[in-house]
Image: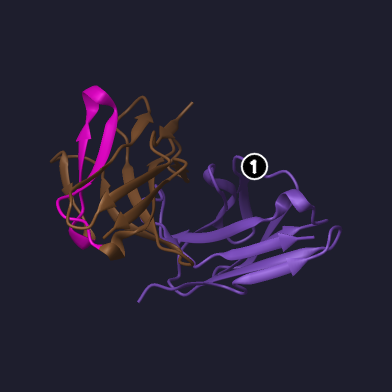
Chain colours: A brown, B purple
Amino acid sequence: AQSVTQPDIHITVSEGASLELRCNYSYGATPYLFWYVQSPGQGLQLLLKYFSGDTLVQGIKGFEAEFKRSQSSFNLRKPSVHWSDAAEYFCAVLNQAGTALIFGKGTTLSVSS
Amino acid sequence: DVKVTQSSRYLVKRTGEKVFLECVQDMDHENMFWYRQDPGLGLRLIYFSYDVKMKEKGDIPEGYSVSREKKERFSLILESASTNQTSMYLCASSSSLPAIEQYFGPGTRLTVT
């Protein structure tokens, strides 16, 4: 069965430091992969997505993600974190039928000053 | 601008009540989705609809039903609310399948007492 694993439940990063959030997926074919962010009290906002082509994907708010087929990973990165990045981050894969997203359990990011 | 709205941000209901959660999108999208979000579990698909009056069960449909009488509106119904249905409910829509561009509403936090 398809699944998405986010190994880190909670991460704390100092403001200005770099960030990497991990995501591993289980999927037979080439996956459609996504990262969403949810700020407190808000809905989900799409940060970036990968379908095919260049394995390094640029998104909004200075985020990027790299698709590594050999590792079944799609890690999210940002070179310098801002206090406003504190939020919950979800990795997701589109199911095989193409009808819905399968989400990981999320990683909560805290930013310390 | 893309817009998915949900009728209530917060809702408190009693056990056994019939509960309606409403979602409206103004993008003329074919597909609409209901997800449930719980801490530590991420988002899980309850139901989705790919056309008016058409629906498909998601991963956790038990205790829920849905209605889509008009293209822009998708309702989630809890026939007899129970305390284990206390959760955040998120609606989403997409224009086509595969559903690679899903737009999310702000969510309804339902408490069943």
- Is B68 left, or right, of A105 in this rendering? right
Residue in view at x 17 percent, y 47 percent: A57
Q: Which residues are magenta?
A: A61-82
Occupied quadrant, residue A30:
top left
Amino acid carrying label 1: it is Ile
**Closer to the camera, B70 or A110?**
A110
Residue in view at x 59 percent, y 62 percent: B52
Occupied quadrant, residue A52:
top left
Q: Residue furthest right?
A: B16
Q: Chain of mark 1?
A: B
Counting from the top left corner in percent of width and height, residue A4 is at 41, 34
Counting from the top left corner in percent of width and height, residue A62 is at 18, 58
Residue in view at x 44 percent, y 40 percent: A104
Within-10-Å neighbours for mark 1: few <14, some 14–19, many 20+: few
Please tell me whether mark 1 sits on a helix, a strand or a loop: loop
Residue wearing tag 1: B60
**Residue A71 in sight from this viewpoint:** yes
Counting from the top left corner in percent of width and height, residue B8 is at 62, 73
Q: Is residue A94 above or below residue B102?
A: above
**Residue B75 in sight from this viewpoint:** no
Residue in view at x 55 percent, y 48 percent: B39
- Disc tally is 1
Q: Is residue A103 above or below residue A59?
A: above
Counting from the top left corner in percent of width and height, residue B46 is at 61, 48
Q: Is residue B108 magenta?
A: no
The C terminus of chain A - image quarter: bottom left
**Closer to the camera, B56 or A105?**
A105
